[in-house]
Amino acid sequence: MRFRKNGFGALIVLGILLTLTTACGGGGGGGGAVIPPGLVAAFAGGNPTPGAMTINMTSGPSNGSTFSILVNVTGIPDFFGAAFRVTFNGATASLAGSSAAGSFIDVGGATVNFNAVESTPGTVLVNATRQGMVAGVSPAATDLLITLTFNADAATGGNVFTFGTAADREVRTCATANGVCPALNDNMLTWSGGTMVAN
Amino acid sequence: MKTLARYLLPALALAALASLPTTAATLYVATTGDDMTADGTLGLPYLTIQAAYDDALDNDTIRVMPGTYIECIFASVITQRSINLEAEDWFVNQDNTTTIIDGTAQCFFPFSVVNIGGFNSRVEGFTITGGGAGGIFTIGTVTITNNMITGNTSTAGAGIYANPATCYYGDTLTQIIDNTVVNNSVAVQAGEELSGRGGGIFVRAQSEPFISGSLGCVGGAPTVIIDNNTVTDNTATLDGGGIYAFTNTTTDLATAVTVTGNLISGNTAGLGATDGAGGGIFVTTFGYYGENFTVSNNNVAGNFGTEGAGISARIDSLDSADHNVAVNDNNITGNSAEADGGGLDLFLYAQDLMAVANVDIEAIGNTVSGNDAAGSNAGGGGVLATFQSIRSNAPSMRLAIGDNRIIGNTANVIGGGASLFASAEADDESLPVADGIVRPATATIDFIGNLVAGNTATQPGFVGAGGGLFNFFVAFGEATATIRQDFNTISDNVADTVTSGGVEIELLTGFDNAGGPEEGLAVLEMNNNIIDGNTGFGVGGPAPGGAMGSTANIDNSGFTYNNVFGSGNANYEGWFNDRTNLQGNISLDSLLDPITQVPMACSPTIDAADPAIGVGSEPAPNGALANLGHTGTTANAATSLADPNGDNIVDGIDVLQVSVSFGSSLGGVRFIPTADQDGNDTIDGTDLAFVAAQFGDTCPN
């Protein structure tokens, strides 16, 4: 149950804006879970050789119970931005942070907008997008969009990470700086997640 | 005695030096003085105030030393002199209790303890008591300030009786400021006009015309200011326990009376078997021309009366009246009416008004709480409002009740929060026999933007109806009685379970006395209201032609964009028909904050108002639609969910839509209207901020 914003809202908004317009934004907490000592997590993407028009997850750096997921874009011309949800079993993993470092969408010094928040356990709301009256950018082949870092909170033999449903995601492309930017039909896209194992 | 010296010597001097300016003198009075030897200095003061006054010249000051002076001051009756009557101890120690003018066994009808007049006189810093015909009587332009006026009796205005007497003084200004008027009382005197009224203060504000050839009647308009006084524990046999004020114009010079910033408490109107209205304050208009009352920012608490225990404000209008009464921003709490109108009683009477007439009574921004009405007639625990129009349909007639907080009031039978009576008669139904004069009539009450919550209209032994609101229509002949209720929140009110805890509607229509062919029409307009959590029915009343025995003739088609929900019995009583999902009406949990009764985020009442109505002052993001209820269209309205794609969750898709259209304007190819959260036709940082601030927020579908 949410109450109306009060006078502090403007300050909060400013703070969030500053966060959004920097290269690294968002982030969620580990929820205070007690991580079993010696827990080691590993993530494996489900589609190591993506074709065109694909957004997929691959494994990034990991350290003990902390692991990273690289969200990549392959073969989507004039890519402007994407929004999606990452869903998983929140009982064994939680969002630790996010990073825009190395993302291909800030080409040309465009303002970019990254956000990742675990709104409820097991659901992370994500957007990674250019901003303003600029054209999209085409990935060279498979390029990094955003890095998401998670904690493994409990041992699991397989925690499946997906991009949610078609209603929860959107990709827009902009061919020119001032032209239209249609939302791509989800049927044209392939979304590939992965699985985390923690022991 | 220096009287002769003070009169004769100045007279001789004036004869020789007529062109030289005179200097106002200060004459001292002390209990150690001697009127026979006094010269008015501190060394030789007067013994009595009266002697000093008799010797004072225009603009002189009489400074009275501490002590008790048992006398009456006959300082007026149509005097031309302006005198300042001051208590020394007030100016030295801000103490108005040590210099006492006591009229006990000294002052007899019609004279008060202090009778003062002039073009610019002042009484300051005294305790005035023991008057048998009132404490202070003023005439002309007088300021009464910083006095303690207590323990006086009279037939009207026991504490202060202000009569500007514009016939003699022309335009006048009466100021009653910063006084304490406590424990005075008035009683009816047989044959005396308006006696038994104004226990604390009585104001007779009449504008009077110049009368050619009359005995000095120059004519003028009065202005009266009653500001920042404490008026407590006064009693009146009839009306106005604390304050009674009336205006009356027989000329086109307007009157103006302002009652503002006063504490009015513990006063009583209507003693014993006698009825009295306005336990705290009673104001009314009488005349044919411009009359203006402002009653604002007063704290009116714990008063008693037969009707309008807190404040009773009335317009009595005829002909070409131009009467304006504003009762705004008062705190009216804990008052108790023996009959009707526990907190506030508004009455607009219009008879045979000309088209040019303008009569307007409004109550805006008041807090009306914890009052009660024990009667079984008109009810109105918080507010009783009556508009009686007889053969009048002037376009500028208005009774408006807006933006008030009407909370926790009690009526024994009807209208726990408010009772609204709209009565229009093309003929005068009060006449036992038709007089043959029939004219179209209208009466419209606007009830807009009010919070009506937690009121009760049922007591043991009664079948209460209209816990929140009780509406009653009377329309006879070629007449229309209308009640408009827009943007109100009517919640958590209680009435008998077989009646309407929210809004009760009853009517009486018929043909006029003259046998005209047209039956009167009652019109109910209810739009953009929240009616939630009331006992019994949310909206209802006896079927037309049923309990009231009338001919059914009501137009209630104007019931649109309301949310009626959570009623104890049913949301709509049978005859009214269930309006859910018709004409914008919904029946969903309003999600009201239990303390403020303001819709919380995700309330279905947000952005649910008639699209034809703008958002007014609602803060962004406002969805370009107003909210229902008392905060709708106001700056206090709850904001909308910043959700451009409308899926009830603020997520990445919303940010993406703002980002992709960022910098575009209305008409541009990238412009996404729903991304324009602030409605300024440009997608900019503000829109992004709204979405960002709510990122992750969700509302249940």
Image (cartoon, coloured by chain):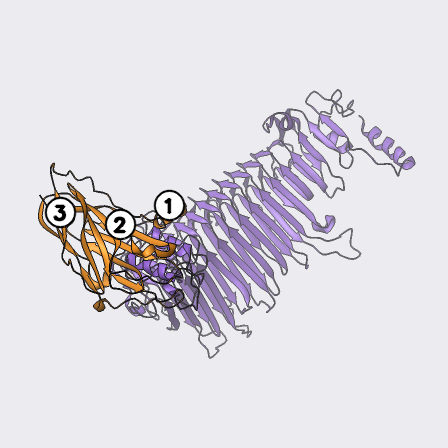
Looking at the picture, do discs 2 and 1 lie on one chain? yes
Q: Color used for chain B? A: purple
Answer few, some or many: residues within 10 Å of disc 1's Cα (few below 14, many 20 plus, some between 14 and 19): some
**Nearer to me, A19 or B699:** A19
Chain identity of mark 2: A
Residue B629 location (% of width, % of height): 38, 58
* Upstream in sequence: badge 2 or badge 3: 3
Chain identifier for the orange-coloured part of the image: A
In the image, residue A81 sits, relative to residue B455, either above or below, namely below
Residue located farthest toward the bottom when viewing the structure as drawn: B517
**Nearer to me, B176 or B600:** B600
Quickly name the residue at label 1. Answer: A15
* Upstream in sequence: badge 2 or badge 1: 1
Front disc: 2 or 3: 3
Residue B171 location (% of width, % of height): 71, 50
| Residue B456 seen anywhere in this rendered image of the structure | no
Quickly name the residue at label 3. Answer: A42
* Upstream in sequence: badge 3 or badge 1: 1
- Label 2 sits on a secondary structure element that is strand
Residue B604: which disc?
Answer: none
| CA distance separating discs 2 and 1 | 15 Å
The kind of residue on which mark 1 rests is Gly
In the image, residue A61 sits, relative to residue B497, either above or below, namely above
- Label 3 sits on a secondary structure element that is strand
Residue A177 horizontal side relative to residue B443, left or right: left
| CA distance separating discs 2 and 3 | 22 Å
Residue B597 location (% of width, % of height): 35, 51
Quickly name the residue at label 2. Answer: A117
The kind of residue on which mark 2 rests is Val
Residue B699 horizontal side relative to residue A13, left or right: left
Chain identity of mark 3: A
